[in-house]
Image: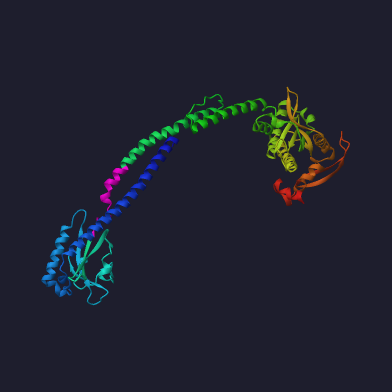
């Protein structure tokens, strides 16, 4: 479903729901007014009929034997005439009857004359007046304002009462009128009005929805074409001009995005072959090489080198050497990037890696040592694979050191290189060389050991006097993760605190 169709459907749904609610409210209000009007008519019939009744004749009908009296016949004739005259489309009187105070119970009312032609509602003179099977235990005065509503077989019955006074003004009887409303309420009377109104609103909604959905979605489709073009690498796509509204603001932002992406693409194309992914991302995020200016900061440096690779490569075809190194570096780079390292440079059959730059890393020592362990594990798996293929396996030495260094863009105007320089870097390189002499795979300085100590299992490698450095360094070899603290480097912060 297209966006235009969704907008059209939403507008249509809103109109339908709104009109449905209005129709429902209109129906309820009209239903209430019609019911009220019907009740007023029923009450008017009751009052007007009661006004012409002879109070003496009504009160004289007390027992079933009185049904044969002239008074009963006269009252029945009047009630039948009134009933039949009010059986019309707007009002349908189902039955009429008279009520007097019961001779057996002064708190109850009893039937007098009854006009019903339905055996279900046939009542004898003297029967107690009931509503829904419950005797009406109120006086005539209290009965007058009441409006009895009953339901039976899907019909609604509206009952009203008219007072009958004697010559002294005393209330002595009542005339009851029962009007039956149409089955299922008054909906058949209201349906034409509701349906016509709803049909007109729906037609209006169809026209308005089609026009508005087109006006709303047309600019979005134009903007989408531009975005698709930019996503495909066309940074010269022409952004259309819109009126001074939200779409104009979006177009302005789109132009700015197009310009920025063009600049980022130019930088990425020019430098992707010279600097690592992290460095390139830092340049693009900061908007230029200013993000890589030289600064002094604490970093952890890792040097890795293949042992005896020069001798090994002399016995292999150049193609095999390149293929082997490519596979080796692919695995190592994946491990380094996974542990937040920045590849500074490749050194033939080795590499220099920085942790803690260009982005700050408070757990750089742990990340560096963990990366070294994973690199050795990856190499072991590679060697097993190469041996199964008849190739020669090899070993790798790693040296790690932490400390302050100058980090940033270093070089000339013609060639700049993001790297680190200083004694920290030199010591890491020397430790890598000394790892072969000490006979370990990973050799770590005391400065890195101090920062990564809680997470790993260590073994002292002694005090080393490395070439080109007057001060000696206490070195350690790492043998793996501490089983009791096998968790992420960040959780080792507790160990630092301790």
Percent position of residue 482, x then y: 75, 49
Q: Is residue 467 left or right of residue 218?
A: right
Q: Is residue 185 magenta?
A: yes
Where residue 269 sits, quadrant-wise, is top right
Question: Is 143 located above or below residue 430 in the figure?
Answer: below
Q: Is residue 322 left or right of residue 200?
A: right
In this rendered view, identify the residue nearer to me: 341 or 421. Answer: 421
Judge whether 330 appears above or below 184 on screen.
above
Q: Which residues are magenta?
A: 179-198
Residue 59 vs 234, above or below: the answer is below
Residue at the top extreme of this rendering: 414
Quadrant for the N terminus in the image: top left
Q: From the viewer's perspective, is 433 left or right of 354?
A: right
Residue positioned most to the left: 70
Name the quadrant containing residue 263.
Answer: top right
Q: How many marks?
A: 0
* Residue appearing at x 22%, y 76% in the figure: 103
Q: Coloring scheme of the render?
A: rainbow
Residue 399 visible, this orientation: no
Q: Residue farthest to the front?
A: 168
The residue at 41%/32% (across/down) is: 214
Q: Quadrant of residue 304?
A: top right
Percent coordinates x, y for residue 476 in the rendering: 82, 43
Residue 345 image position (x, y, % from top left): 74, 31
What type of secondary structure mainly makes up the magenta span?
A: helix
Name the one closer to the observer, 3 or 33: 33
Query: 21 or 356: nearer the eye?
Result: 21
Q: Residue at x 16, y 61 (%)?
A: 82
Image position, residue 98 (x, y; %): 19, 68
């Amino acid at each position: 479903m297209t966006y235009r169709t969704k907008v059209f459907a939403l507008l249509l749904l809103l109109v339908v729901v709104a009109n449905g609610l209005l129709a429902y409210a209109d129906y309820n209000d009209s239903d209430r007014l019609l019911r009220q009007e019907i009740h007023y008519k029923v009450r008017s019939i009751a009052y007007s009929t009661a006004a012409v009744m002879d109070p003496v004749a009504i009160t004289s009908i007390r027992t079933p034997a009185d049904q044969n009296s002239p008074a009963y016949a006269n009252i029945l004739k009047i009630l039948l005439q009134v009933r039949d005259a009010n059986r019309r489309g707007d009002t349908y009187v189902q039955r009429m009857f008279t009520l007097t105070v019961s001779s057996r119970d002064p708190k109850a009312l009893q039937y007098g004359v009854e006009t019903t032609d339905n055996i279900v509602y046939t009542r004898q003179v003297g029967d107690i007046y009931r509503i829904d099977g419950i005797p009406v235990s109120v006086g005539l005065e209290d009965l007058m304002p009441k409006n009895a509503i009953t339901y039976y077989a899907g019909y609604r019955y509206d009952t009203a009462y008219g007072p009958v006074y004697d010559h002294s003004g005393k209330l002595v009887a009542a005339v009851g009128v029962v009007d039956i409303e149409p089955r299922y309420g008054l909906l058949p009377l209201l349906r034409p009005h509701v349906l016509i109104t709803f049909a007109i609103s729906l037609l209006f909604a169809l026209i308005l929805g089609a026009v508005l959905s087109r006006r709303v979605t047309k600019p979005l489709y134009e903007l989408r074409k531009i975005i698709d073009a930019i996503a495909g690498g066309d940074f010269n796509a022409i952004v259309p001009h819109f009126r001074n509204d939200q779409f104009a603001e979006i177009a302005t932002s789109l132009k700015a995005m197009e310009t920025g992406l063009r600049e980022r693409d130019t930088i990425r194309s020019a430098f992707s072959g010279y600097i690592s992914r992290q460095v390139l991302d830092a340049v693009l995020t900061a908007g230029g090489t200013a993000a890589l200016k030289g600064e002094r900061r604490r970093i952890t440096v890792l040097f890795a080198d293949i042992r005896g690779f020069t001798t090994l490569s002399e016995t292999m075809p150049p193609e095999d050497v390149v293929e082997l190194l490519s596979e080796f570096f692919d695995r190592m780079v994946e491990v380094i990037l996974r542990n937040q390292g920045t590849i500074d440079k490749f050194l033939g059959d080795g590499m220099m890696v920085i942790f803690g730059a260009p982005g700050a890393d408070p757990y750089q020592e742990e990340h560096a040592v963990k990366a070294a362990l994973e690199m050795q594990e990856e190499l072991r798996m590679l060697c097993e694979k190469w041996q199964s293929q008849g190739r020669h396996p090899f070993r790798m030495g790693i040296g790690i050191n932490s400390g302050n260094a100058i980090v940033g863009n270093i070089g000339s105007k013609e060639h700049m290189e993001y790297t680190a320089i200083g004694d920290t870097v030199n010591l890491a390189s020397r430790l890598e060389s000394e790892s072969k002499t000490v006979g370990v795979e990973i050799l770590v300085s005391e400065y890195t050991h101090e920062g990564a100590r809680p997470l790993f299992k260590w073994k002292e490698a002694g005090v080393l006097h490395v070439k080109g450095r007057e001060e000696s360094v206490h070195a350690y070899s790492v043998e793996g993760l501490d089983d009791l603290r096998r968790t992420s480097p960040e959780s080792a912060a507790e160990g630092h605190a301790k």
